[in-house]
Image: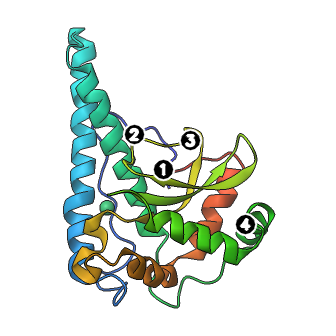
Amino acid sequence: MQYTMIFPGQHQLPPLPYAYNALEPVISARTLRIHHDKHHKSYVDGLNKAELSLVDARRRNDFQYIKYWEKELAFNGSGHILHSIFWTVMAPSGTGGQPGPHTTAQINNYFGSFDAFKEQFKNATEKVEASGWGILTWQPSWRRMEILQAEKHQNLTQWSGIPILVCDVWEHAYYLDYQNERRKFIDAWWNIINWYEVERRLVLGMNGQVHLV
Ligand code: FE
């Protein structure tokens, strides 16, 4: 867990908390290797490059490319954070436990029942337009959860919302294994959720301790 400030350009690709084949057959080793080693790494590299470019811009007081670097900062920063969460909210089938007491209470409080939450999460995730994410957040402003879609992951956010459970439905997350059948991926993915990590993230968020990565 990261408590200290990360200096510009110092972000690192976090290792997967399990082997490449640990999530099979839901996610193949080939998909996971490309997704983590190539896609996530490119977000980390892009974020570091954007931060260092802005350090340079500040030093030279030259902001002619500010729009470009701010977009790179948002796109790669969100990609790095969401992928870092995505790896930890999954676990090998049968080892992720059941929704914890806080998770269950907050879900029932706001969504009415676990099944209602599950159906909204799956439908929201399935129907993300083009590439994106399904995201369960803790909204500290209103002391409750919410389910959100992120079409481009730097957009459509509620800025203070804290991601609790995220599902990557960019094509690179499932296309080798499921082709265009996104719902089949989501249904299978549901069985590898790490509910211990979901509960930990919720409790940290509820206590105002926001550690995203
Ligand atoms: Fe991804």
Q: Amino acid at mark 2?
A: Ile
Chain-order first, disc 2 or disc 3: 2
Q: x%, y% of residue 174? A: 30, 74
User: In this rendering, is residue 19 above or below 37?
Assistant: below
Q: Residues within 10 Å of mark 1 (few under 14, many from 20)?
A: few
Q: x%, y% of residue 79? A: 35, 50
Q: Residues within 10 Å of mark 4 (few under 14, many from 20)?
A: many
Instruction: Report if residue 20 is visible in the image.
Output: no
Q: Which residue is mark 4?
A: 107
- Disc 1 element: loop
From mark 2 to mark 1, how far is it between C-alphas?
A: 9 Å
- Disc 2 element: loop
**Depth-wise, is mark 2 or mark 3 nearer the camera?**
3
Q: Amino acid at mark 4?
A: Ile
User: In this rendering, is residue 27 above or below 8?
Assistant: below
- Disc 3 element: loop
